[in-house]
Image (spheres, helix red, strand yellow):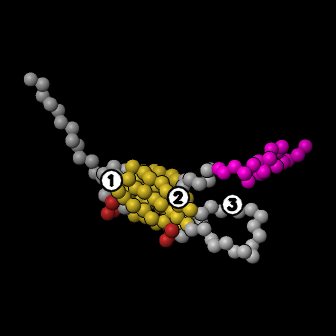
Amino acid sequence: MSLISRNFYLDDLFDDFITSTKGNDMKCDIYEKEGDYHIEMDIPGFDKNDISIECNNGYLTITAEKQAESNDETKNYIRRERKYGKYQRSFYLGDMESDNINAEFKDGLLKISIPKKEEIETKKVIEIK
């Protein structure tokens, strides 16, 4: 009996040749608490200066961009798995109070709180004559 699955070696071999998009996503949790919406997003390996948050036409867009390291000719890489480039994720929030959005980034975790806009009832009953 072997503790290593039969596919272990083949999986590793194919990982080198097939580009996978899994792991490139900016994973997040979205929840509502105390009248605000909250987004908690994992962005490990990035610095606060690599991340931007924008509000435009009802969309909240989070962008993280990291430039590749310059190639060091003295390094003979066996495997390179760390990804560089631009990652972006957008959320439609509709009409929001962008002045009151708060964001905090610490230890690879981005926390954003978005106050819910007070909805004004626009329902009108029309009398039938």
Q: Secondary structure at mark 1?
A: loop
Q: Decide if residue 95 is in sight here.
A: yes
Residue 100: which quarter of the image?
bottom left
Dot 3, crowdedness within 10 Å: few (<14), some or many (≥20)? Answer: few
Question: What secondary structure is found at the residue carrying circle 2?
Answer: strand
Q: Which residue is mark 1?
A: 57
Q: Is residue 70 above or below residue 33?
A: below
Please give the residue where the numbered disc 3 appears in the rendered image.
81
**Left or right placement of residue 22 versus residue 96 in this view:** right
121 or 34, which is in the foreground?
A: 121
Rounded to the nearest angstrom, the CA distance separating label 3 from label 2 is 16 Å
Q: How many marks?
A: 3
What amino acid is at disc 2? Tyr
Amino acid at the residue labelled 3? Glu
Q: What residue is disc 2 on?
A: 87
- Residue at the right extreme of this rendering: 1
Question: In the rendered image, which quarter contains the N terminus?
Answer: top right
The local secondary structure at tag 3 comes to loop
First reached walking from the N terminus: tag 1 or tag 2 = 1
The stretch in magenta equals: 1-20
Instruction: Give me the C-alpha separation between circle 1 and circle 2.
Output: 20 Å
